[in-house]
Amino acid sequence: MEDFDVAIVGARCAGASLATLLARRGLRVCVVDKAQFPSETPSTHVVQPCGVRILGELGVLDALLETAVPLNRFTMINDDVRIDGPIDVEEFGAPGLCVRRLTLDAALVDACSAAGADVRTGHAVTGVLKDATGRVRGVRSRDGDINARLVVGADGRKSVVAKSVGSAEYLTTPPGRIPAWAYFEGVDDREGRLRIGRVGDLTFLASPTDGGLYMAGIAVDVDRVSDFHSARDTYFNDALARCPDLPELLDGARRVGPIRVMTDWHGYFRQSAGPGWVLVGDAGHFKDFTAAQGISDALRQARSLAATIGDAFSSGGDTDAPLQNWWRWRDRDAYEMYWLATDMGLPGTSTPLITRLLRGIADDTESTRLFGHVLNHDLAPAKLFTPRRLLAASARAFADRPGQIWATSREIGSAIGNDIRRTRARRTIGQLR
């Protein structure tokens, strides 16, 4: 049986990045993953500039930019409201990026191996090892047990580590939509524009990706999923034809490979630290995909957790208290974006209040700039969607529908009620420990 400082289960965005950073600090790190690389996994592909900066720190960005198009502009559409904004490299510190996980994860695995981590792919972990006190001391696998002072679960939504330690979920949300996406070749779009939005009851995301391909995806309302599966190609093609700009972009293009679908998901926070273990990335928290935050979240969490673990090991002291504090930081960091993503991914059509809120942003250059910073996770959504802005949008929503005062009132009341409940829940997340 081999001994390591840290055993990381999962070698994708969160796990491989964490392994690289810990190995650079001189820790003995073993990374195991049941998958072989390169390989696919469900993902929006989008990396916000904050995540791209970390890819640079990890030493993989230059290679990725050789095959992927930097994203320098974004467009968000909500029916007849269109928000166009720059992703200014000087302002954000990096462009955005849209990279297939086939490419991104393989680059990150190579980087952690080069940094000195022991990388074992095709290596399925079946559970954790515990001592007589219940403290986690390693992982059990079909290829042999691995001892470690700390076990990190970076193994995604269906985390074996989370299940093995009995990690509880809280603040869960049901899925509003099911994502489906495909790749196309022959698309003449080297502009580097990320397109996201909603038209009627349809949401979409599209962008040039790596390898000369273009990624276009839709999100199907949960109550329409059976219709989608009964005629997948027709449903998908008809949906793309409804998305602004995409019919022209995809005219003459050829789809490469099948339509990918992620059918089994829900939003959650999980208990993410305990004696001898910690969860990072999707293993500990998952939000609605519509806001395209998952990869960047994983990278930011890995960098933060690497500092916490590295400092704790360097001091020779207890790791449990620092990891508990890191877990609290993760919840605070993720909380507002979790609910914004949930709202962005709600099924059905947009509401007059949301339309008015977004129109106010579209009509103001500074607000458009700030919206980019919200998506980049360096401005809290509450700093943009202020009570004053909500009040102004409410007044305009009433003016837009003078004959539907009660319907508008119910919508505004529901929004206020949600905000109150979420504020109260935020006060209690530290008590769920």
Image (cartoon, grey):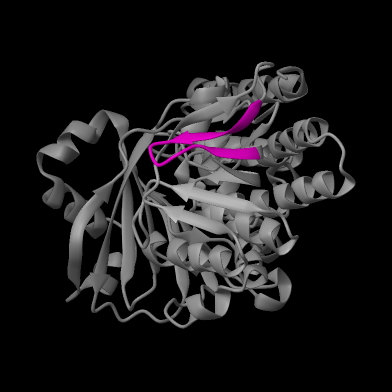
Q: Is residue 426 magenta?
A: no
Q: Is 313 above or below relative to 375?
A: above
Q: Is residue 146 magenta?
A: yes
Residue at image point 72% right, 51% down: 306
Residue 400: x %, y % from top left = 51, 40
The dominant secondary structure in magenta is: strand
Quadrant in which the C terminus appears: top right
Q: Is residue 66 left or right of residue 219?
A: right
Q: Looking at the image, can residue 274 be seen? A: yes
Front residue of 359 and 100: 100
Q: Is residue 240 left or right of residue 42?
A: left
On the image, which quarter does residue 255 sit in?
A: bottom left
Residue 335: x %, y % from top left = 67, 35
Quadrant in which the N terminus appears: top right
Residue at image point 59% right, 29% down: 269
Front residue of 294 and 344: 294
Front residue of 46 and 345: 46
Residue at image point 63% right, 68% down: 58
Residue 20: x %, y % from top left = 63, 61
Q: Looking at the image, can residue 399 be seen? A: no
Q: Is residue 78 left or right of residue 167?
A: left
Q: Is 230 above or below relative to 182?
A: above
Residue 263: x %, y % from top left = 30, 36
Q: Is 189 above or below relative to 413?
A: below
Q: Which residues are magenta?
A: 136-148
Q: How many marks?
A: 0
